[in-house]
Amino acid sequence: MRIDLHTHSTVSDGTDDPADVVRKAAAAGLDVLGLTDHDTAASWPEAAAAAEEAGLTLVRGMEVSTKLGRSSVHLLAYLPDPAYPPLQEALDKVLDGRNQRVPAICDKLQALGIDVTVDDVRRVSEDAAATGRPHVADAMIAAGAVRTRAEAFDGYLNPGGRAYVERYAAPLRETIGTVADAGGVTVLAHPWGRSSRAELTPEVLADLAAAGLSGLEVDHLDHDAATRDRLRALARDLDLVVTGSSDYHGAGKAGHPLGCETTDPAEYERLVTQAADAARASGRAAPPVLVP
Ligand code: AMP
Ligand code: ZN
Ligand code: FE
Ligand code: FE
Protein backbone atom coordinates (compact mmCIF):
# COMPACT_ATOMS: atom_id res chain seq x y z
CA MET A 1 0.00 0.00 0.00
CA ARG A 2 1.48 3.36 -1.07
CA ILE A 3 0.40 6.39 0.94
CA ASP A 4 1.17 10.09 0.29
CA LEU A 5 -0.42 12.42 2.85
CA HIS A 6 0.65 15.95 1.84
CA THR A 7 -0.17 17.44 -1.59
CA HIS A 8 -1.46 20.71 -3.06
CA SER A 9 -3.85 21.66 -5.86
CA THR A 10 -4.85 24.89 -7.60
CA VAL A 11 -7.13 25.58 -4.62
CA SER A 12 -3.92 26.82 -3.03
CA ASP A 13 -0.51 27.01 -4.71
CA GLY A 14 -0.35 23.74 -6.63
CA THR A 15 -0.67 23.77 -10.42
CA ASP A 16 -3.04 20.79 -10.95
CA ASP A 17 -6.71 21.10 -10.10
CA PRO A 18 -7.96 18.76 -7.34
CA ALA A 19 -9.34 16.12 -9.70
CA ASP A 20 -6.03 16.07 -11.60
CA VAL A 21 -4.02 15.59 -8.42
CA VAL A 22 -6.24 12.59 -7.61
CA ARG A 23 -5.96 11.11 -11.11
CA LYS A 24 -2.20 11.60 -11.21
CA ALA A 25 -1.88 10.04 -7.76
CA ALA A 26 -3.74 6.95 -8.96
CA ALA A 27 -1.59 6.84 -12.10
CA ALA A 28 1.54 7.12 -9.93
CA GLY A 29 0.47 3.94 -8.12
CA LEU A 30 -0.68 5.54 -4.89
CA ASP A 31 -3.47 3.85 -2.93
CA VAL A 32 -4.06 6.60 -0.38
CA LEU A 33 -3.84 10.34 -1.02
CA GLY A 34 -3.98 13.19 1.46
CA LEU A 35 -4.93 16.44 -0.27
CA THR A 36 -3.78 19.28 1.99
CA ASP A 37 -4.20 22.69 0.42
CA HIS A 38 -3.07 25.66 2.47
CA ASP A 39 -5.68 26.96 4.94
CA THR A 40 -8.81 25.67 3.22
CA ALA A 41 -11.04 22.65 2.67
CA ALA A 42 -12.29 24.02 -0.65
CA SER A 43 -10.61 21.24 -2.65
CA TRP A 44 -12.43 18.42 -0.89
CA PRO A 45 -15.66 18.04 -2.89
CA GLU A 46 -13.95 17.90 -6.29
CA ALA A 47 -11.23 15.60 -4.96
CA ALA A 48 -13.78 13.26 -3.38
CA ALA A 49 -15.69 12.87 -6.62
CA ALA A 50 -12.47 12.17 -8.53
CA ALA A 51 -11.24 9.71 -5.88
CA GLU A 52 -14.41 7.70 -6.14
CA GLU A 53 -13.97 7.51 -9.88
CA ALA A 54 -10.26 6.67 -9.69
CA GLY A 55 -10.70 4.06 -6.93
CA LEU A 56 -8.33 5.90 -4.62
CA THR A 57 -8.64 6.38 -0.87
CA LEU A 58 -8.83 10.09 -0.04
CA VAL A 59 -7.83 11.59 3.28
CA ARG A 60 -9.26 15.07 3.41
CA GLY A 61 -6.76 17.48 4.90
CA MET A 62 -5.36 20.98 4.93
CA GLU A 63 -2.02 22.60 5.81
CA VAL A 64 -2.68 25.38 8.28
CA SER A 65 -0.31 28.36 8.51
CA THR A 66 0.51 28.73 12.19
CA LYS A 67 3.05 30.56 14.27
CA LEU A 68 5.08 29.60 17.31
CA GLY A 69 7.09 32.46 18.75
CA ARG A 70 8.62 34.13 15.71
CA SER A 71 8.63 31.00 13.59
CA SER A 72 6.21 29.97 10.90
CA VAL A 73 4.99 26.39 11.49
CA HIS A 74 2.93 24.41 8.98
CA LEU A 75 0.35 22.21 10.66
CA LEU A 76 -1.27 19.41 8.68
CA ALA A 77 -4.85 18.86 9.84
CA TYR A 78 -6.59 15.68 8.76
CA LEU A 79 -10.31 14.97 8.76
CA PRO A 80 -11.67 17.87 10.82
CA ASP A 81 -15.26 19.02 10.35
CA PRO A 82 -14.62 22.06 8.12
CA ALA A 83 -17.94 23.59 9.22
CA TYR A 84 -16.86 23.79 12.88
CA PRO A 85 -17.20 27.56 13.47
CA PRO A 86 -13.97 28.13 15.45
CA LEU A 87 -11.99 26.32 12.75
CA GLN A 88 -13.72 28.31 10.02
CA GLU A 89 -12.98 31.55 11.86
CA ALA A 90 -9.32 30.62 12.30
CA LEU A 91 -8.96 29.78 8.59
CA ASP A 92 -10.80 32.93 7.50
CA LYS A 93 -8.35 35.05 9.47
CA VAL A 94 -5.41 33.36 7.76
CA LEU A 95 -7.00 33.70 4.31
CA ASP A 96 -7.72 37.40 4.97
CA GLY A 97 -4.08 37.85 5.93
CA ARG A 98 -3.03 36.19 2.67
CA ASN A 99 -5.24 38.54 0.64
CA GLN A 100 -4.12 41.66 2.50
CA ARG A 101 -0.48 40.82 1.88
CA VAL A 102 -0.72 40.75 -1.93
CA PRO A 103 -1.01 44.55 -2.49
CA ALA A 104 1.83 45.16 -0.03
CA ILE A 105 4.11 42.76 -1.91
CA CYS A 106 3.13 44.37 -5.24
CA ASP A 107 4.01 47.81 -3.82
CA LYS A 108 7.48 46.56 -2.91
CA LEU A 109 7.94 44.98 -6.35
CA GLN A 110 6.81 48.20 -8.06
CA ALA A 111 9.35 50.14 -6.00
CA LEU A 112 11.99 47.73 -7.31
CA GLY A 113 10.89 48.41 -10.88
CA ILE A 114 9.01 45.13 -11.34
CA ASP A 115 5.61 45.83 -12.80
CA VAL A 116 3.36 43.27 -11.12
CA THR A 117 -0.09 44.40 -9.96
CA VAL A 118 -2.73 42.80 -7.74
CA ASP A 119 -4.75 42.10 -10.89
CA ASP A 120 -1.76 40.28 -12.41
CA VAL A 121 -1.55 38.08 -9.31
CA ARG A 122 -5.32 37.42 -9.37
CA ARG A 123 -5.04 36.45 -13.03
CA VAL A 124 -2.55 33.67 -12.25
CA SER A 125 -4.11 32.57 -8.95
CA GLU A 126 -7.49 32.27 -10.74
CA ASP A 127 -10.00 30.75 -8.32
CA ALA A 128 -7.50 29.71 -5.64
CA ALA A 129 -9.02 30.04 -2.17
CA ALA A 130 -5.57 30.62 -0.66
CA THR A 131 -3.41 33.17 -2.45
CA GLY A 132 0.28 32.74 -1.73
CA ARG A 133 3.71 33.97 -2.61
CA PRO A 134 3.94 31.27 -5.31
CA HIS A 135 1.16 33.11 -7.19
CA VAL A 136 3.12 36.34 -6.92
CA ALA A 137 6.09 34.38 -8.26
CA ASP A 138 3.98 33.17 -11.19
CA ALA A 139 2.96 36.77 -11.95
CA MET A 140 6.64 37.76 -11.84
CA ILE A 141 7.41 34.96 -14.32
CA ALA A 142 4.60 36.20 -16.58
CA ALA A 143 6.07 39.72 -16.36
CA GLY A 144 9.48 38.37 -17.39
CA ALA A 145 11.16 39.39 -14.13
CA VAL A 146 12.25 35.85 -13.16
CA ARG A 147 12.23 32.44 -14.80
CA THR A 148 11.06 30.17 -11.97
CA ARG A 149 9.22 30.27 -8.64
CA ALA A 150 12.47 29.32 -6.93
CA GLU A 151 14.20 32.33 -8.49
CA ALA A 152 11.41 34.63 -7.28
CA PHE A 153 11.69 33.26 -3.74
CA ASP A 154 15.48 33.41 -3.65
CA GLY A 155 15.66 36.90 -5.12
CA TYR A 156 12.62 38.58 -3.58
CA LEU A 157 10.01 36.62 -1.63
CA ASN A 158 11.86 34.66 1.05
CA PRO A 159 11.76 36.08 4.60
CA GLY A 160 14.17 39.00 4.67
CA GLY A 161 13.96 39.30 0.88
CA ARG A 162 13.47 42.60 -0.93
CA ALA A 163 9.74 42.09 -1.49
CA TYR A 164 8.93 40.04 1.60
CA VAL A 165 5.86 40.96 3.60
CA GLU A 166 4.71 39.13 6.72
CA ARG A 167 1.20 37.87 7.12
CA TYR A 168 -1.04 36.63 9.89
CA ALA A 169 -0.72 32.99 11.01
CA ALA A 170 -2.81 31.19 13.63
CA PRO A 171 -1.29 30.40 17.05
CA LEU A 172 0.06 26.82 16.89
CA ARG A 173 -1.06 25.38 20.25
CA GLU A 174 -4.53 26.85 19.98
CA THR A 175 -4.90 25.48 16.44
CA ILE A 176 -3.99 21.95 17.52
CA GLY A 177 -6.87 22.22 20.01
CA THR A 178 -9.27 23.71 17.48
CA VAL A 179 -8.63 20.89 15.00
CA ALA A 180 -9.14 18.30 17.74
CA ASP A 181 -12.39 19.98 18.76
CA ALA A 182 -13.42 19.78 15.09
CA GLY A 183 -12.89 16.01 15.22
CA GLY A 184 -9.57 15.96 13.35
CA VAL A 185 -5.93 15.16 14.02
CA THR A 186 -2.76 17.20 13.51
CA VAL A 187 0.73 16.44 12.19
CA LEU A 188 3.59 18.94 12.06
CA ALA A 189 4.62 19.42 8.40
CA HIS A 190 8.39 19.36 7.74
CA PRO A 191 9.06 20.35 11.39
CA TRP A 192 12.80 20.63 10.96
CA GLY A 193 12.70 22.20 7.52
CA ARG A 194 13.84 25.77 6.94
CA SER A 195 11.36 27.88 8.85
CA SER A 196 10.52 26.09 12.08
CA ARG A 197 13.55 24.08 13.20
CA ALA A 198 14.90 26.57 15.73
CA GLU A 199 11.59 26.94 17.54
CA LEU A 200 10.57 23.24 17.53
CA THR A 201 13.06 21.92 20.08
CA PRO A 202 12.63 18.41 21.52
CA GLU A 203 11.14 20.02 24.65
CA VAL A 204 8.61 21.96 22.59
CA LEU A 205 7.71 18.83 20.62
CA ALA A 206 7.06 17.00 23.89
CA ASP A 207 4.85 19.85 25.02
CA LEU A 208 2.90 19.80 21.72
CA ALA A 209 2.47 16.02 21.98
CA ALA A 210 0.98 16.55 25.44
CA ALA A 211 -1.28 19.25 23.95
CA GLY A 212 -2.77 16.73 21.52
CA LEU A 213 -0.49 16.69 18.48
CA SER A 214 -0.73 13.32 16.71
CA GLY A 215 2.33 13.13 14.53
CA LEU A 216 5.47 14.39 12.84
CA GLU A 217 6.12 14.47 9.11
CA VAL A 218 9.58 12.94 9.28
CA ASP A 219 10.07 11.80 5.70
CA HIS A 220 10.02 15.05 3.72
CA LEU A 221 12.58 16.25 1.18
CA ASP A 222 13.42 19.24 3.39
CA HIS A 223 14.92 16.79 5.94
CA ASP A 224 18.32 15.16 5.39
CA ALA A 225 19.08 11.64 6.64
CA ALA A 226 20.49 12.73 10.00
CA THR A 227 17.50 15.00 10.64
CA ARG A 228 15.11 12.14 9.86
CA ASP A 229 16.93 9.79 12.25
CA ARG A 230 16.70 12.28 15.11
CA LEU A 231 13.05 13.12 14.43
CA ARG A 232 12.11 9.45 14.13
CA ALA A 233 13.71 8.72 17.50
CA LEU A 234 11.87 11.66 19.06
CA ALA A 235 8.57 10.49 17.58
CA ARG A 236 9.14 7.05 19.05
CA ASP A 237 9.91 8.50 22.50
CA LEU A 238 6.84 10.74 22.40
CA ASP A 239 4.55 8.09 20.89
CA LEU A 240 3.87 10.30 17.86
CA VAL A 241 2.83 8.95 14.46
CA VAL A 242 5.52 9.22 11.75
CA THR A 243 4.40 10.28 8.29
CA GLY A 244 6.17 10.69 4.98
CA SER A 245 4.86 12.70 2.04
CA SER A 246 5.80 14.39 -1.21
CA ASP A 247 4.45 17.94 -0.61
CA TYR A 248 3.56 17.80 -4.31
CA HIS A 249 2.73 21.16 -5.94
CA GLY A 250 2.53 20.00 -9.58
CA ALA A 251 4.88 22.06 -11.74
CA GLY A 252 5.07 24.64 -8.94
CA LYS A 253 7.79 22.97 -6.91
CA ALA A 254 10.47 21.05 -8.76
CA GLY A 255 11.65 17.70 -7.45
CA HIS A 256 8.61 16.77 -5.34
CA PRO A 257 6.77 14.19 -7.52
CA LEU A 258 3.75 12.36 -6.12
CA GLY A 259 4.83 9.41 -3.98
CA CYS A 260 8.49 10.49 -3.77
CA GLU A 261 8.09 10.07 -0.01
CA THR A 262 5.46 7.81 1.55
CA THR A 263 3.90 6.90 4.89
CA ASP A 264 4.21 3.44 6.44
CA PRO A 265 0.80 1.68 6.38
CA ALA A 266 0.94 0.90 10.12
CA GLU A 267 1.58 4.57 10.90
CA TYR A 268 -1.27 5.57 8.60
CA GLU A 269 -3.58 3.17 10.46
CA ARG A 270 -2.60 4.77 13.78
CA LEU A 271 -3.35 8.21 12.37
CA VAL A 272 -6.82 7.36 11.04
CA THR A 273 -7.66 5.52 14.26
CA GLN A 274 -6.78 8.65 16.23
CA ALA A 275 -8.90 10.70 13.83
CA ALA A 276 -11.87 8.39 14.40
CA ASP A 277 -11.37 8.75 18.17
CA ALA A 278 -11.19 12.54 17.85
CA ALA A 279 -14.35 12.59 15.77
CA ARG A 280 -16.21 10.52 18.35
CA ALA A 281 -14.96 12.65 21.24
CA SER A 282 -15.85 15.90 19.45
CA GLY A 283 -19.37 14.89 18.56
CA ARG A 284 -18.79 16.70 15.24
CA ALA A 285 -19.70 15.30 11.85
CA ALA A 286 -16.08 14.92 10.80
CA PRO A 287 -15.57 13.54 7.28
CA PRO A 288 -14.60 9.87 7.17
CA VAL A 289 -11.66 8.62 5.16
CA LEU A 290 -13.13 8.18 1.70
CA VAL A 291 -12.52 4.54 0.77
CA PRO A 292 -13.67 3.56 -2.74
P1 AMP B 1 2.98 31.52 1.46
O1 AMP B 1 1.95 30.43 1.54
O2 AMP B 1 2.51 32.69 0.70
O3 AMP B 1 3.56 31.87 2.79
O4 AMP B 1 4.17 30.92 0.59
C1 AMP B 1 4.85 29.78 1.08
C2 AMP B 1 4.69 28.61 0.12
O5 AMP B 1 5.49 28.84 -1.02
C3 AMP B 1 5.20 27.31 0.71
O6 AMP B 1 4.19 26.61 1.36
C4 AMP B 1 5.67 26.56 -0.49
O7 AMP B 1 4.58 25.85 -1.03
C5 AMP B 1 6.04 27.63 -1.48
N1 AMP B 1 7.49 27.84 -1.62
C6 AMP B 1 8.35 28.23 -0.68
N2 AMP B 1 9.61 28.35 -1.19
C7 AMP B 1 9.51 28.01 -2.49
C8 AMP B 1 10.46 27.93 -3.56
N3 AMP B 1 11.75 28.22 -3.40
N4 AMP B 1 9.98 27.55 -4.78
C9 AMP B 1 8.69 27.26 -4.97
N5 AMP B 1 7.75 27.32 -3.99
C10 AMP B 1 8.16 27.70 -2.77
ZN1 ZN C 1 2.50 25.41 -0.84
FE1 FE D 1 4.55 23.52 4.12
FE1 FE E 1 2.83 21.87 1.70
Image (cartoon, rainbow, N blue to C red):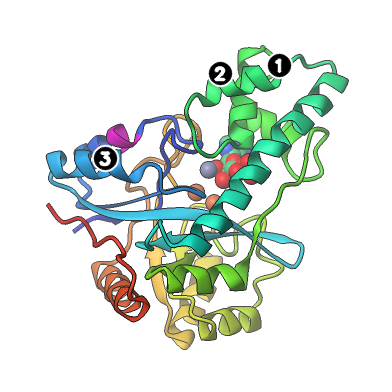
Asked if residue 19 lies in the magenta stretch, the reply is yes
Residue type (three-letter) at the residue carrying disc 3? Val
Q: Which quadrant holds residue 80?
A: bottom left
**Mark 2 secondary-structure assignment:** helix
For the record, the magenta segment spans: 18-22
**Mark 1 secondary-structure assignment:** loop
Residue type (three-letter) at the residue carrying disc 2? Arg
Disc 1 Cβ-to-ligand 1 distance below 8 Å: no
**Mark 3 secondary-structure assignment:** helix
- Which disc is residue 123 wearing? 2
Upstream in sequence: badge 2 or badge 1: 2
Coordinates of residue 165 in the picture (x, y in percent): 78, 40
* Pointers 2 and 1 in contact (C-beta within 8 Å): no
Q: Nearer the viewer, residue 106 or 150?
A: 106
> Circle 3 sits on which residue?
22
Whether residue 208 is visible to the viewer of this picture, yes or no, is yes
Q: Crowdedness of circle 1 by 10 Å Cα count: few (<14), some, many (20+)?
A: some
> Circle 1 sits on which residue?
145
Upstream in sequence: badge 3 or badge 1: 3
Mark 2 and mark 1: span between their CA atoms? 16 Å
Residue type (three-letter) at the residue carrying disc 1? Ala
